[in-house]
Amino acid sequence: MSPLSVIFGRELALAWKAGPAAPVGFFLGAAVLLPLAMGTDRALLEAAGPPLVWVAAALAALMTLERLFQADLEDGSLDQLFLADESVELIVAAKGAALWVAVGLPLALAGAPVAIALQTPIEGIPAVVAGLALGMAAFIGAGLVAAAVTASVKRAGVLIALIVLPFFAPPVVFGAAATGHFGAPFLLLTGCALGAVSVGPILAAAALRLQAE
Amino acid sequence: MGLNLGVDKEAEHFAPVRLSVEAVTLERGGHVLFERLSFSAAGGDFVELRGPNGAGKTSLLRAIAGFLKLTTGAITFEGVEDAQLALHLLGHRDGLKAALNVEAHARYWASLLGEGADAGAALDRVGLARIADLPARILSQGQSRRLALTRLVTAPRPVWLLDEPAAGLDTQGKDLLDALIAEHRARGGLVIAGLHERLTEEATMTVTL
């Protein structure tokens, strides 16, 4: 097996053991409470539902970031990444991909029942799930950088939230606008995801090099 | 634990390697650890770093590994292309993941750092083969250190930087460490270790910080 697939497998096992339950549960919980809080006005739910779902998804993504590199720094395994015969950028990308599979995909799938509860027509469900999957990729790509920059900061949650806020804004804007159809906002969301996924690991690797000091 | 302490005669010899530390000054947090330290060592040498707590043994090892910026001076390797691919750093943190089992660590390092011996053989060598299925969470301190030692066994790299390698090891573990160091030197490898206690293996040079 190639080193990268072994690294991906290990990160997937770690992300899975750390548990997608907390972020996905948070997302589901928030999305279930929304219609209860907003009442039964169908028009209101249709209008306000998608933006609120995207805010819940962004907050759920935030939950996964704090320990992402902090644990590696504390237990000493970060050092070994720099001694590896594999570029740190690719290792970081594999870590992000593992997080997306373990948390991003389950959360996107959880978006289907949530969309139904929020009165999205059945034919719009695939676009909701695909949109959330892309959105999670964008969140994780930007989040890698914030997690790397704050790896040595204790209780970095608030700091991470402040750093990623401007970078979470575009996918939230386009994602909420795209809900239910594969239109122009969906393409812009795809662009956000591609940009974050390609640039995020490079910036995160640079930040981690400073953390090794 | 069935330890195999014999020196492996078939192991391949390393190409000649040379390390030069020239007039190195290191500062941490505005505090000077040591000034204008110079020494050089070659393959087959065993350099021990001695000094009280806080003298800078760990910092010097991390600087040689390329993780710390030098305040002044230079650290150069001859005979290796990329220093970070030619060295092992065994720090006081073992680099273990509590949720993963012993064998998963050995396999991961073998593919991350370069495969020499296979993971099973490496675990056998450090005496952990019988507990390959246990998660790292429940390992004792000595067992964790032995697991970290599998990195030295799985990936053949000429330069070993060891920070308190004997910490937590029992008598047998220390014998194993001695045997690994002797074997490594016989292959032309260079060992630099920060030590508080004496190992049986005689150092060729002592650097006091």
Image (cartoon, rainbow, N blue to C red):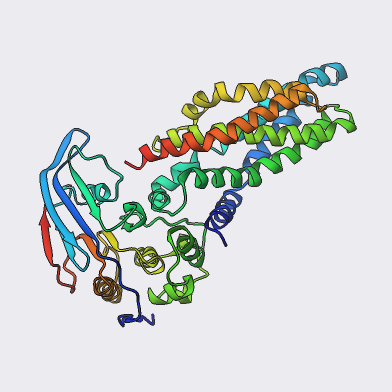
Left or right: A118 in relation to B73: right
Q: Position of residue A130 (x, y in %)?
A: 76, 35
Q: Do we see residue B51 in this rendering?
A: no
Given residues A2 and B28, the one toward you in this image is: A2
Q: Residue at image x 72%, y 27%?
A: A53
Task: Tell me which corner region of the image, top left, top right, bottom left or bottom right, holds residue A124.
Answer: top right
Task: Tell me which corner region of the image, top left, top right, bottom left or bottom right, holds residue A196.
Answer: top right
Q: Do we see residue A192 in this rendering?
A: yes
Indicate the quadrant containing the C terminus of chain A: top left, top right, bottom left or bottom right. top left
Q: Residue at image x 55%, y 43%?
A: A93
Q: Position of residue B134 (x, y in %)?
A: 50, 67
Left or right: B201 in relation to A61: left
Indicate the quadrant containing the N terminus of chain A: top left, top right, bottom left or bottom right. bottom right
Given residues A111 and B78, the one toward you in this image is: B78
Q: Position of residue B64 (x, y in %)?
A: 25, 50
Q: Position of residue B4 (x, y in %)?
A: 35, 81
Task: Tell me which corner region of the image, top left, top right, bottom left or bottom right, holds residue A57.
Answer: top right
Given residues B9 and A71, the one toward you in this image is: B9
